[in-house]
Amino acid sequence: METKNHSSHSGFILLGISSNPQLQKPLFAIFLIMYLVTVVGNVLIILAIHSDSRLHTPMYFFLSNLSFMDICFTTVIVPKMLVNLLSETKAISFVGCLVQMYFFMAFANTDSYLLASMAIDRLVAICNPFHYDRVMNPRRCLLMLLGSCTISHLHSLLRVLLMSRLSFCASHVIKHFFCDTQPVLKLSCSDTSSSQIVVMTETLAVIATPFLCILFSYLRIIITVLRIPSAAGKWKAFSTCSSHLTVVALFYGSVIYVYFRPLSMYSVVKDRIATVMYTVVTPMLNPFIYSLRNKDMNRGLRKLRDRIHL
C-alpha cells in the first residue's frame, strides 16, 4: 500500500525541454521573451477591443476571450518551466502536477471551443448576413462562452480524477516540460488500458466536436462564397476568415499530432516540439495574426496607442 501511494508523497521530476546544462540559460531567455510577448500582445488585443466601441461585435468578443484564455493557458505552463530551467531539482508535487494538468486542459479546450464559436460567427456573417444581429445576439454569444468554459472544465475534472487513481511505483521522471497526460501515463505501473480508452474516447468527443464544427462551418462558407459572381466579392469574403483559419491550422495541427495517437507511438522529442507549438508559439502569434491584415484591429490598436500617449 505504501508503494502504491508513493507518487502522492514524492511527486515528479520534470525533465524539461532539454537536459543539456549548457542550453538551460539560453532556453530560459528564449521562453521568457516568448512569454512576455504573448502576455503583452494578448493584453493589447483585449484593451484595444474594449476601448473601441466599433469592435464591440461578436467576432471581437470571442477574440478578446480567446486572448484572455491564451494568457491563462501559457501562464499555467511557462512560468513553472522557466523556474525549472534555472533549478537543480525541477520537482513538482503530485497535487501540483494534477492542478497544472487540470488548468492546462481546461484552458486549451476552451480555446478550442472559442475557435469553433468564431467559425460559427463567420458562417452566420457570410451565409446569413441579414439575420446576423438576431442570430449572434449578446445573450447567445455569452451562452456560447459559458458553454465552452463549462464543457472544458468538466472534461478536465474527469481526466484529473482518472489520473489521480493511478499508481506510480517506478521512475518519477516526466520526460516533458509540464504535466501532460501521455508522459504521465507512461510512468504509471497500474493497468492504464481502461484509462487510455476513456481518455482517447472522451478526448475525441471533446476536441473533435469543435473541430468538426469548424470544418462544417467552412464547408458552408466555401459553398456560399463560390456562388458570389465577382472575384473581388469572393476575395473580400475569404479575407475575413484568413486570420481565423491560420490560427485553427496552427492549433489543431499540433494538437491532433500529439493526442490522437496510441500511447505506444509516443515520441519524447517530437511531442515536445509539437507541444511547444500550441502551448507557446501559437498563443504568441495570435495577436500578430489577428492584427496584421485586420484594418479594424489596427485602428483599435492605434486608438489605444493614442490614449496611452495622452
Image (cartoon, grey):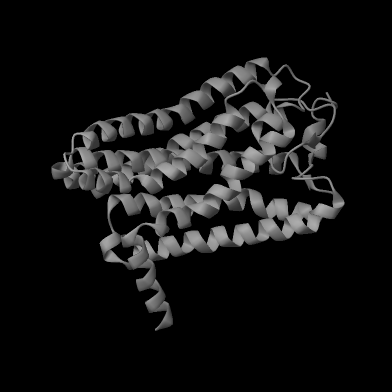
In the rendering, at what x and y percent does residue 214 appear?
Answer: 37, 34
- Nearer to me, 110 or 260: 260
Q: Does 218 sit above or below residue 195?
A: below
Q: Write the residue at 37% across / 71% down.
A: 302
Q: Write the residue at 77% across / 35% down.
A: 8
Q: Does 48 sit above or below residue 282?
A: below
Q: Does 45 sit above or below residue 181?
A: below
In the image, is 18 to the left or to the right of 207? right
In the rendering, at what x and y percent does residue 152 appear?
Answer: 48, 37
User: What is the quadrant of the C terminus in the image?
Assistant: bottom left
Residue 202 at least partly seen: yes
In the rendering, at what x and y percent does residue 212 appear?
Answer: 39, 28
In the rendering, at what x and y percent does residue 32 appear?
Answer: 67, 60
- Count up the numbered dots: 0
In the image, is 123 to the left or to the right of 258? left
Q: Write the residue at 71% across / 32% down.
A: 183
Residue 109 at least partly seen: no
User: What is the quadrant of the N terminus in the image?
Assistant: top right
Q: Write the residue at 79% across / 58% down.
A: 25
Residue that extends furthest to the left in the rendered view of this protein: 130
Q: Does 289 sit above or below residue 167?
A: below
- Nearer to me, 202 or 235: 235
